[in-house]
Image (cartoon, rainbow, N blue to C red):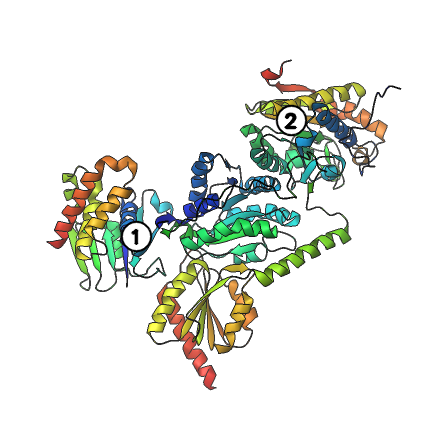
Amino acid sequence: MARELWKGNEALAEAAVRAGAEAFFGYPITPQTELLEYMARRMPELGRTFLQAESEIAAIHMVYGAACAGVRALSSSSSPGISLMQEGLSYLAGSEVPCVLVDIMRGGPGLGNIQPSQSDYFQLTRSAGHGDFHPLVLAPSTVQEAVDLMYASFDLAFGWRTLVILAGDGTLGQMMEPVEMPPMRALAVERPDWALTGAAGRSPRVISSLYLDAAELEQSNLRLQAKLQQMAATQQRWESFCVEDADYLVVAFGTVARIAQSAVRAARRAGIRVGLFRPVTLWPYPRQPLDAICPQLRGVLVVEMNGGQMVEDVRCVVRERVPVRFLGHLGGVIPMPDEIEAELAQLVSLSGRAAFS
Amino acid sequence: METSIVVSGFGGQGALLAGQLLAHAALASGLEVTWIPSYGPEMRGGTAHCTVVVGDEPIGAPLVRHPECVVALNLPSVDKYEPLVAAGGLLVYDSTLVQRPVERVDLCAVAVPASEVAQRFGSPRLANLVLLGALLALRPVVTLEAMGAALRDHLPERHADLLQNNLEALHAGAALGKG
Amino acid sequence: METIYRRPALLADLPTHYCPGCGHGTVHRLVAETIEGLGIGSRTICVAPVGCAVLAYKYFVLDCCVAAHGRAPAMATGLKRVLPDRVIFTYQGDGDLASIGGNEILHAALRGEPITIIFVNNGVYGMTGGQMAPTTPLGMRTTSSPLGRDSQQQGYPIHLPELLAALPGVAYAARRSTHSVAEIRRARQAIQRAFTVQLRGLGLGIVELLGACPTNWQVTPVEALEFIEQVMLPVYPLGEFKVAAELGA
């Protein structure tokens, strides 16, 4: 199929449609609103469910309800809306009901602004709600990748009975890029064996996150933990660029990774042997592949649009082996390639000295 | 090889649309491209701008600090981008609306009476196409033919009756750019 | 011998966790009887609340899920939208529905979701130990209104069916009580109507049922029935506040 220009938010919506999403529930919030607007037109056209909820809280619980029926349901929002949804995310996790959520991140805390940000990293990977769980968090850096990951997300969600979050930022949501859309999938006819459909011809099913007995709740949690460990072992995704001979490594995700790629190209032209490591899964974090690169490195630069969140994962992997510098912009300020280059030059001069001391 | 182009103007002057059409033309020409708008409250009443990056390899940063080309549809856009255009870059602006001279000498400033010319084709709102034509005459990121095809394929339906006027405005701008 | 009463098949044969004299047992039975009577048990899904009735899924022999506190109408909306030919009902208490879930029930009603809401009002938060609810009558002492509910401080009791009756999306809104055999009969009819409007696609049906909470009212089960009559009824008049014309009289 030919490539067409798609806006990130709309491309995500169409990819969800093609992946077999049967229900969308959402609430307007900049900078993700085009996703909701696209669904408002597209879903009814296909005889599928679209509903604008009264709040993000209601939206995620509508998703929860629809997902309990075993259908592919999703919602989308941006940072303040995700905060409101956290209650529902925790219930979804506790009852292992799969669904997909898009977070087109904006600046915070509080009302913040509507400019691009990556400051929900901790929220999405560490504290998507109360209790012990992690969603599977995917961080595309191009509109094409957003489409591809969205297309895969329901299979992941249903395969693992997990919540899958696509984490983008305002840049990815608003920008247009060439995209090759995947084919339209037929909707699933069979419902999973846990789905609520009315107990015709079988014994009733219950979907609940309630375990009043401590030992039972512990057992339920241990099952969840075992699954998360299995996911952590098998679901790490990443991409690397120019790392084979790299002495230095830039680590960045999402929009910042593609900006960093421009900086890495420029630094290579200036003779610095630098590569780029881009986590695609933010949880599980691609620790093993990053760890494998470490022995060859003299320094690492982490760039994020936040106060330093993913850098903690990087430091966990790199430990004290080489210096880890951090460049962050907050509040919707986007790092530019030239300042990443300047930080790299700093890193080279500092770790160069360290190497001779 | 990458070229970055900013199109900037008041909301309603068609800055975002002009950038989108350029992006469509680039894609149809087999190039890689990104288009990103300003999306703040400035969309309503203030300036709206978009950044288009065109290249022959997948685009890294979709935003640039110092764009190589700027199409300025109004005075605030000239004020904002004159200091930001890359050295040796191009600043094409509507001299019907912007009467002050461009002061920087290390860039190529091209004054095009775009609103006045656009009026000849029926609407001052075609100034965006006049300026885009002038830009492409000086920096042929895509051909005028590709731009014309993008107009035919992607002009919003509500403006479909204005296709011919759009094409004429584009070519008139290109003639002014060359001259 | 003629059977004049039996446990509804849709009610599990289990001792409940409810306190002696609690209104939930009666309401559970009425709901199970109604669903059975309408012959819709194999296509009905229950959305349980947070509160004393959180374990409703143990007693209803139906597909069930448990919503977060107050979110049952949103969850029911999600279910109904993807399973329009199934019967979806929520079972909620007064704190759940009228306080934390106020927005969810209001908007489900505004949308006219064809779902059924069984709303049990006992004037207190039962499960957390008898705190003031939005339904607590003025002057009533609770653990969080130890001096008695004062309208100047804590506002007025909420009359939800009356409020919702004003909305075009609501097809049936009524309040009934469980303090006497006669009222229980009327309650059963109201529950049946609240399901019937769903089956006919007329809109949202809600029944508020005044139920006893002897434990938190600190009275005996028998006194609790008198409490409903003497304290609750003056605040909460019984009746049908909206009956869709299609339903007939």
Disc 2: which chain? C
Q: Judge whether residue A335 can be spotted in this image.
A: no
- Residue B37 drawn at (x, y percent): 34, 50
Side (left or right) of C144 relative to B97: right
Label 1: few (<14), some (14–19) or many (≥20) C-alpha neighbours in 10 Å = many
Q: Tell me which residue sits at (39%, 65%) in the image.
A: A261
Question: Would you place residue A343 above or below residue A158 in this image?
Answer: below
Q: Tell me which residue sits at (71%, 46%) in the image.
A: A210
Disc 1: which chain? B
Please state which amino acid type lies under the numbered disc 2: Ile
- Figure quadrant of residue C176: top right
Extreme residue toward the left, this view: B179
For mark 1, what is the residue?
A: B27
Of residue A136 and residue B70, the one placed in the foreground of this image is A136
Which circle, 1 or 2, is nearer the viewer? 1
Tag 2, which secondary structure? strand
Q: Judge whether residue A155 can be spotted in this image.
A: yes
For mark 2, what is the residue?
A: C206
- Residue A322 drawn at (x, y percent): 51, 76
